[in-house]
Amino acid sequence: MTTLVLCVDRADDIGRTVGVSMPVDGWDAVRSLVTEVGLADPEDSTVNCLLEALRVTRDLRSDDEAAIVAVVSGSGDSPVDADRSVAAQVDTLLDQYAPDSAIIVTDSADDERLVPIIESRLPVDSVDRVVVRQARDIESTYYLLKQFLADEELRSTVLVPLGVGLLLLPVLLIRFSLGVALAGLASLLGAAVLYKGLAIDVYLSRLPDQVRDALYSGQVSVVTYAVAGGLALVGIFLGGLAVSPVADGVVLVPVMQFFYSSIPWLALAALTASAGRLLDELIEADRIPRPYLNLPFGVVALGLVVRGFAGYFLERENVLPHLRAFGVTVQPTERLALFVVSAIVVSLVGVRVAAKVSHDYPDDDAEADADREAVDP
């Protein structure tokens, strides 16, 4: 079994340094090449790569294994030309020695791009990357930074929000305190991360086409979505008006005040939007899918639960007066239980209604099976 220990140099550092023709093969030729490269440029990491190739070859020969050491280097005006020249040099070595496998020795991550080219011609048993100890962290960081800057999507995702934040920081520091400036900067960066992480940019890019298609097709949901947006804004506005100033660092009470006042309007907005979607499905398919039937009941149940818990906390803090029914004062715990039970009842009613309506409409798969049976009895 013959193993080819191949030192690769994609950037042609060896050719530019000593001007030898490639490939260089054989123990004596590679050892002489180490001396020439080291004398020409002692700081070049290629010297370490060549020495590692010799060491690997020596270890293989000490185990009574046939090993051949060789050096290939890229040449040309473009990366494509360099890769093709390396491929041609590898083919020359294969024709000359006919090795069974190869061990690739590199001194940078860029050289490892040649591994697939060599693997397409010869089985590769191992890739040995040599990095000078003093430069290990520096080179790895440099390569990662270079790859990062070469990716256009990553640049626009990370560098643009970071640059905007750094530009706004001095303005915020002049106008506000350090704490407010850092909080504003953190909020900006957080919004940018969520904007990309939740794919909001993709949704916004598709939104104009979706709105145009909906308008052209006469969908009712276009109008109901607009109404739902207005109702949601009303709910947010009224929730903001209901918030009282924070006292003694207690943030929970203003939050509960906001939810307690805004939830009815937000639930109404969700019901309006779901009603439009229900009408669209009914007009288009002459039937209502089960998930769309469950949605209104789920919205009402969720609104009852949130408003119930918000009212419970506000009553415990004496911000909201106790509920009175038939001359009896209802305690906060009883009020919360009433809202939770009401939400469960609404959910069960929704499940029952959806099951009833879905039972009245046969499934599409059942209809398709019946059609196939009618055609092929």
Image (cartoon, rainbow, N blue to C red):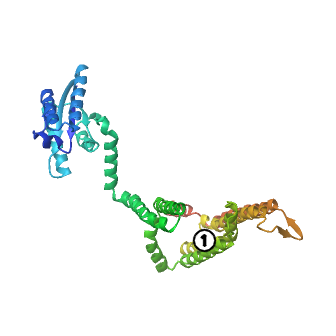
Q: What is the three-letter code of the residue carrying label 1?
A: Ser
Residue 143, percent across and down? 31, 47
Task: Give the residue drawn at x 83%, y 62%.
Answer: 331
In the image as oriented, which residue stretches furthest toward the right?
327
Q: Nearer the viewer, residue 350 or 344?
A: 344
Is 336 situated left or right of 41 in this image?
right
Q: Nearer the viewer, residue 373 or 303?
A: 303
Q: Quadrant of residue 61?
A: top left
Residue 79, above or below 365 = above
Report the number of numbered marks.
Answer: 1
Residue 146, percent across and down? 31, 51
Is 154 situated left or right of 217 in this image?
left
Residue 169, percent across and down? 45, 63
Local packing at callout 1 (Cα closer than 10 Å; few below 14, some 14-19, many 20+) is: many
**Would residue 227 be visible to someone looking at this image?**
yes
On the image, numbered disc 1 is attached to which residue? Answer: 274
Residue 112, above or below 52 = below
Q: Quadrant of residue 122?
A: top left
**Would residue 202 be visible to someone looking at this image?**
no
Task: Give the residue drawn at x 33%, y 55%.
Answer: 149
Element marked by disc 1: helix
Task: Give the residue drawn at x 34%, y 53%.
Answer: 148
Task: Give the residue drawn at x 43%, y 73%.
Answer: 209
Q: Quadrant of residue 34?
A: top left
Q: Nearer the viewer, residue 230 or 351?
A: 230
Residue 264, percent across and down? 68, 71
Quarter of the N terminus within the rendering: top left
